[in-house]
Amino acid sequence: MNINVNEYKLPMDKSGPYGITVGPDGAMWFTENRGNKIGRITTKGEITEYLLPTLDAEPLIITKGIDGAMWFTEYKANKIGKITIGGKVTEYDIPTTNAGPYGITLGPDGAMWFTEITSNKIGRITVNGEISEYDLPNPGSFPSMIIAGSDGALWFTENQGNRIGRITISGDITEFNIPTMASGPVGICKGGDDAIWFVEIMGNKIGRITISGEFTEYSLPTQNAKPHAIVSGKDGELWFTEWGGNQIGRIKSCGEIIEYQIPTIDSEPHGLVLGPDGAIWFTEECGKIGQLIY
């Protein structure tokens, strides 16, 4: 496969771009963790930035909501934020103090579902800003990223609990133990095969779990690759970032893995998304947005 990687430098050095999603306007929207901004980049590489109202909010994961706005977590500010394509920002306080909001996704019920790392909860927020919270069964689970599954439930990683969790829209929770000990699951997505795929940042593997709870794991070729986020591609394959390996990885449903080097050394890739142009767009914490064309 012939691939080409383009990189676009952000105006502020080391602004810490982290999460990324596709907006209804056909542009990619991303968080700037240290820059305290939400950024927007077109498929031509044109960048716009919007400063957040709350100082040092530490925005992390971002995704599109049913209302056409982009919703994101503010880890340090303890808020859920949303931004319209016009740049208007609204923020909602989370009831639990120091909840540590991290992952966020659109649920099948039209609400946004998010994880609370430090308070050990899964949260739900409606488009009107009404928040509900659900306690996890086991303390110290460290729920991280979350995604809607093909079964109408939400699936999430438990980074310290070493489990994959499932929560229904009514709040019923089920947990599945990952075969590899202390694997450190983080990123998660729904595959084209309707299974749930996830990365193991400490186990150095890509994992797959069916909606019935059956696991398969695939070891990465690069040692200490530290896979971070994962997303479905356009041909049934999955793409993931390697924070430690400085690579973008690709895995087929059969388990075959290919890795592609990022031009910038120590770029620290984190979030990634399939763009409307068919390319994989990803954030580089060093202060760039990457585009992998294949």
Image (spheres, rainbow, N blue to C red):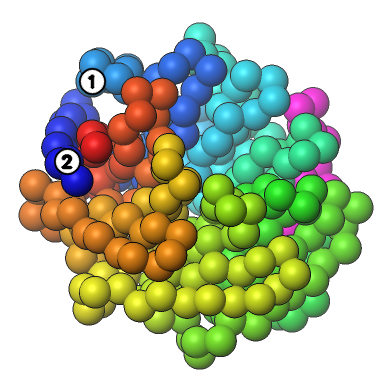
Nearer to us: label 2 or label 1: 2
Q: CA distance from mark 2 to mark 1?
A: 18 Å
Residue 129 belongs to magenta span:
yes
In the rendered image, which quarter contains the C terminus? top left
Q: Amino acid at mark 1?
A: Gly
Rendering coords of residue 106 (x, y %): 67, 38
Q: Amino acid at mark 2?
A: Ile
For image coordinates 55% across by 36% down, the residue present is 63
For image coordinates 33% across by 65% down, the residue present is 256
Whether residue 75 is visible, yes or no, is: yes
Rendering coords of residue 278 (x, y %): 35, 29
| Highlighted magenta segment, given as a residue range | 122-132
Residue 278 position (above or below residue 196):
above
Rendering coords of residue 142 (x, y %): 59, 70
Label 2: state its secondary structure: loop
Point out the residue furthest to the top here. 86
Task: State left or right for residue 254 relative to residue 127.
Answer: left
Residue named by callout 2: 3
Q: Quadrant of residue 252?
A: bottom left
Q: Residues within 10 Å of mark 1 (few under 14, many from 20)?
A: some
Label 1: state its secondary structure: loop
Whether residue 145 is visible, yes or no, is: no
